[in-house]
Image (cartoon, helix red, strand yellow):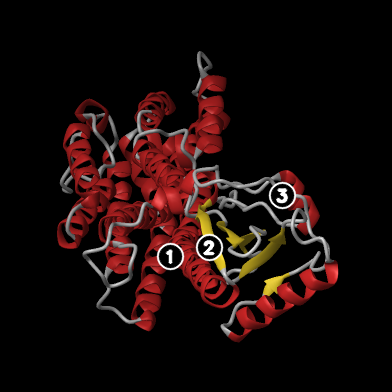
Amino acid sequence: MSANHQRMTSQEYLEKTEELNRLKHGDDRALRLAEEQAREALARMKRESDAVYQGISKQRRRLLEQLSDIENETIATLRDVSRSTEQVRQRMGQLSDRIKDATASIDELMESTRAAFTTAVAMYQQAKEELTASRLDPDYERFATEELRSIETQINALEGRDLSGPAMQAAVQMIMTDLYHMDVIVSGKRVAFIQDQAEALELAATLLTKADNVRKNNHEVLDDATSPLMDMDFWTDGCFGEMEAELRKIQQRLYDGQRDASYSHKQLKADLKRLHELEQIEDMLVVGARSKINLSYFRREQGDLIQEILESDHRYTLISKGFAKGGDEREAFILRMKRHTDGAQVEVIINPGNTDGEADVYFRVDSTTYMDSATMASITQAIADELQENGIDMTQYRACHPEQMPQYQPGDPLNISEQARKYHGIAQRQPMSIPLPS
């Protein structure tokens, strides 16, 4: 509302915020510049209506100019990365003192107001215009709802009343004093809101840019740009896309909140808190996806090593191998083989472990051929010992108890039956999930 600060139309401001939105996946310098412009635009955009602005008294205009200068200096101080923490603290202390000075000057302003509006009727009419101006500023509805309602109630209570008496004159002067105090309240809350909003907008843009870079630059084989890009949605069970969608939803709410008075500072703080949570979640998902793809390669390599050992040292031949559930690389790796001498089948299941970085290896033996449990136990123990020498520990809950298994053929689906899961205690793979807001 100050007389000399640069004012901006809502259309101009929208263009700047839309530019920021377009640049959220662009280069960092352009992004930072757009963020800076959006913050400055928001800080300057106090009033949009010339008609309303002209209806404000010189006295209130002077107070608002003083508060506007303090707001702008406060935001600039908080944004100035060249200042040390101590310098920022000292400067904020000085600005806080200026707020106190502005509050203390209200008595002086009231003296000037009484001189300008010599009758209670004139001051009452001016108070009504001041209230109208405040109502049209969304920040007053956002930050001083109770104060607005109180002033409105006081003005309505005097409507049509005889204002000539001393008590009525005092009541009108109290309304003007409350208007000035409301300006100070709004100014302080606006600075805090703008600062949190700028931090939230910057963090949302940063996280979305980071997510975009992960999708474009994260290869399946680390530091090998010739390998395929990681499918972040696949390896995080859709959580990465859900996180991006939530980020965009919060970002849009932040943009809308710049013009929507119903978007409160409490809601802003909740969104900022969630953004910090999503920052950690994003890192967790990236690390988790990398871990899962590495473990998938590891399970395949273990399967290939077990196949080599069974073929070369124990006279087994391959029936089929691959990942379960139609080749889903997040699932167990299954190896099916039969012994060359008698056709005895074994099935090796390398299941994702319950602990990150581990895998559980299950060795299933077909009862059709292994009728002698002692012989079967001896053979499986010899295989287990050799696998252990190669760093593979078999999980053998039923080591000496063969199972009746189907006669597998090449091309049969590679799945783990419910019977096998129950018999050996083979756990289902647990998909990733995004923690809910705390």
The type of residue carrying mark 1 is Arg
Task: Give the residue at x 76% y 46%.
Answer: 419
The nearer-to-camera label among 1 and 2 is 2
Q: Earlier in the sequence, mark 3 or mark 1?
A: 1
Crowding at label 1, few (<14), some or many (≥20) Cα neighbours within 10 Å?
Answer: many
Q: Is residue 33 left or right of residue 402?
A: left
Pick the residue in front: 152 or 329: 329
Q: Where is residue 10 drawn, in percent x and y? A: 22, 33
Q: Which residue is mark 1?
A: 290
- Amino acid on which disc 2 is placed: Thr
Q: Secondary structure at mark 2?
A: strand
What residue do we see at 34% from left, 51% from top? 201
CB under 8 Å between discs 1 and 2 = no
- Quarter of the view holding residue 248: top left
Between label 3 and label 2, give the one nearer the viewer: 2
Q: Residue at x 42, y 48 (%)?
A: 233
Q: Which residue is mark 2?
A: 317
- In 3D space, how far apart are the residues under numbered discs 3 and 2 (Cα atoms)? 17 Å
